[in-house]
Image (spheres, coloured by chain):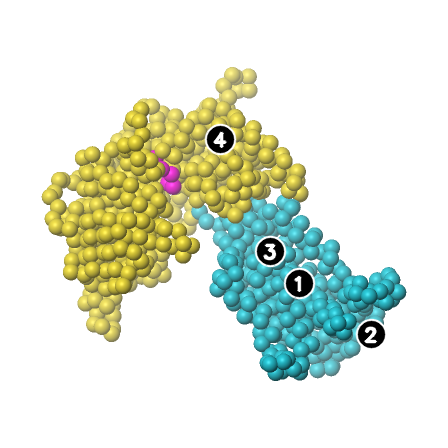
Amino acid sequence: MIEFLHQFLLTIDASVRLATPLIFCAMAGLFAERSGVIDISLEGKLLGAAFAAAAVSSLTGSVYVGLLAAMFVSVLMALIHGFACITHRGNQIVSGLAVNILASGVTVTVAIALFRQGGQTPLLGPGERFGPITLPFAESLSVVPVLGPFYADLISGHNLLIYLLIPLLPFLGWLLYRTRFGLRLRATGEVPAAVDAAGVSVAWVRYRALIIAGILCGLAGAYLSTAHGAGFVREMSAGKGYIALAAMIFGKWRPWPAMGACMLFGFFEAASARLQGVEIPLIGPAPVDIILLLPYILTVILLAGFFGRAIPPKAIGEPYIKER
Amino acid sequence: MNMVDAGGDKQPPAIELRRINKRFGRVHANRDIDLVVERGSVTGIIGENGAGKSTLVSILYGFYTADSGEILIDGAPVRIDKTSVAIDHGIGMVHQHFMLVPTFTVLENIMMGAEGSGLLAPAEMAARARLTDLAETYGLEIDPDALVGDLPVGLQQRVEILKALYRGARILILDEPTGVLTPQEADRLFDVVRVLSGNGVTVLLITHKLREIMAATDQVAVMRHGEVVRSLKTAKTDREELARLMVGRDVLFSAETTERQPGASVLSVRDLGYQDEAGAMRLKDISFDVRAGEILGIAGVSGNGQSELLDILSGIAPLQIGEITFGEDVFTAGRQADPSFLRQLGIAHIPEDRQQRGLVLNFSAAECAILGYQDGPNAGDRIFLDQARIRDRCQKMMVDFDVRPPSPELRAGGFSGGNQQKIVVARELAASPKVLLVGQPTRGVDIGAIEFIHSQLIAMRDAGCAILLVSVELDEILALSDRILVMNDGQIVGEAGRDEADPNRIGLMMAGIDPGSEARP
């Protein structure tokens, strides 16, 4: 029983660690898409930010400078996306793909030029990473049954970026639903002409949404290479941007359900790792690949309308062109 | 010059436009426009499509800037280069297509862009109080917490008006405000307009409907080809004079049509029903016959099932419930008909939306003129298109139907609305159909082209074609139909013969009110 509880806690713990970059990215996608801009460039921004964080952290020795660099690079990439599809009304999918391809090529090229390690950054030392933070009393409480391990394993011992999510999520929800900016942003994603007629610049609202998306992707990228990992590896985003996009759609473009979907998808990933090679009675070896497929399958089922309709923002994907 | 000295008791006009000019490429959309609008008056601007009305109000509302000319608001010259500047000067606009977010509440829609504070909670409190004030002052009651998407169009328009007033509008521009309203809703709107002007709000009413000018305005400016051809007191003019000024010649108000004895039933519809994807019944128990040599008009406010009816009859939407008989052929849920098969049988369709369904805007006019008939002998043999023949045929159509410019190579999207519609009408009539399904034949079409299209439809009728005419323009239905059915909420709620057709009675039926059950005033 105790052993099972321990295993369970470890799996949940791993789920949180795996879900964290998804949550940052999904929130980024949510802000972009609620303003009407499709953001498949989450993947590219994540990769670019991961590289910037690790590279700058390695060069300067400071993980915080690395974090700033990650956010800067990611915002820059968001602005490229914005310049193409807001200012010049380009196709948002094509522009997003271009950003992804750009990130995939540029990160490796610059990594080789800077570090000559085949597209990686050097392994990061302790000051160059976000280390685990042990919360007070974790040691002494860990002997208390049930509550102790729960506190010590699950609540304590994460890095700063994971703890950042706790104030960040309510803040983002508040920004979207309780502020003037949020109202205008949501309106821009639905009926941009109404925003324009109200004397508010549609382009400026969308740019600000993309800048927020850039900052959040920067956090996600820094998490990947300087918190979860200890350095940049080529293609280390490995489709997480797309999974986050799926999670955001699964959460029907709303912050809390989207976060829930990220947790669920993170749990699938953690469970599949934990079940690797485990024999399940009657089934045989655990179907790890199928578990990893679940996020995509669930999203397709959702989009087919089985769990109620996922209604995207009405103006999504459409460049705003002033009529009359 | 009507300059007023500061000591005079006369107020400066609310709006004064001086020699406004605007060009788009070669098109001179506004030419030397002068206009004076007194405070608290209701001023109509009337003109055909393309006369420059919309351009003019767009300049006033800051969508465009004029190439030259001056705008004075309350006697002071202003430069309006952005919508927000117009709003700051107390100009509000109710757009033809509502600028509302359907998933927001009334309150959120009204606040948006004029929240007054960065946080919504205090902004909402203030907006709620203001809204109560406005509702009392102008008699514009509304539930601030209702979702806009759930409101009927008449109330959505009220939200638009409140939105403008909330922003402190003292000048209200109404752009084609009655397009989506029932006649009764339109009358209610004009009541509101009178209350507004009684409270000192200056109203500009942009329309192409003469009746509205006569019903609601104090003065009227008539526009033609980008110029204001005349400004008149409404009380001192009449429909005929205005129409003459708009078009530049005399206009026939009722299409010339004669009584004719219709023949046998050609198209027969029994118990038709239709359920949309969301599960709502869009059509219920529709039964009627269309006879050879008659025009059966279907009146109704847009969105009451007329579009679905046309889609099913033309084979675009599936036939779910009921039976359609056309000559020897009986169609049911088990025997669907596709549009090309129906065309071969002799059912032609002038669709409601010519840009989406009638034409491919990026195709040349010649290509558009064989759309739907591309497998027939007029297009070539079954494999290759006979380009020369297609072109010559289109050329002839263009001459016959007075399409301007008569160039078959030109992209369909390059023609004006009226000329696009003429291409569609010419194509469908060229097939000499036995049944003609017509949806909104003159939507967004100028008066000259309306007359022409109407006369063509009547000629088809006289040649023995059975015509089903769907239109939201009651005047059009009344002018052309031999028989009228009225649709409301997916059902036929009434029928009237040509002689007994009374606009008031039909208007009530369009609103879903059975005139028989109401006590006559």
Disc 2 packing (10 Å; few <14; some 14–19; many ≥20): some
* Type of the residue with mark 3: Arg
Question: Which one is earlier in the sequence, the residue at label 3 or at label 1?
Answer: 1
At a point 75% along the width and 72% down the height, the residue shown is: A1
Asked which secondary structure carries label 3, the reply is loop
Task: Report, in whole angstroms, how far the alpha carbon at label 2 lies from the one at label 4.
Answer: 68 Å
Side of B372 where A202 appears, left or right? right
Q: From the viewer's side, name the closer residue of B350 and B397.
A: B350
Q: Are marks 3 and 2 in contact (CB under 8 Å)?
A: no
Can residue B237 be seen here?
A: no
In the rendered image of the structure, the colour used to display chain B is yellow
* Type of the residue with mark 4: Leu
Q: Badge 1 is on which residue?
A: A23
Q: Are marks 4 and 1 in contact (CB under 8 Å)?
A: no
Task: Report, in whole angstroms, how far the alpha carbon at label 4 lies from the one at label 1.
Answer: 45 Å
Can residue A293 be seen here?
A: yes
Q: Are marks 3 and 1 in contact (CB under 8 Å)?
A: no
Q: Badge 3 is on which residue?
A: A254
Assess whether residue B56 is covered by the magenta stretch. Answer: no
Q: Residue B494, percent across and down?
A: 26, 40
In the rendered image of the structure, the colour used to display chain A is cyan
Q: Badge 2 is on which residue?
A: A125
What is the span of residues highlighted in magenta in the rendered image? B179-183
The residue mark sitting in front, 3 or 2, is 3
Question: Are dots 2 and 4 on a single chain?
Answer: no
Asked which secondary structure carries label 1, the reply is helix
Q: Badge 4 is on which residue?
A: B140
Side of B169 where B20 appears, left or right? left
Q: Residue B309, percent across and down?
A: 30, 52
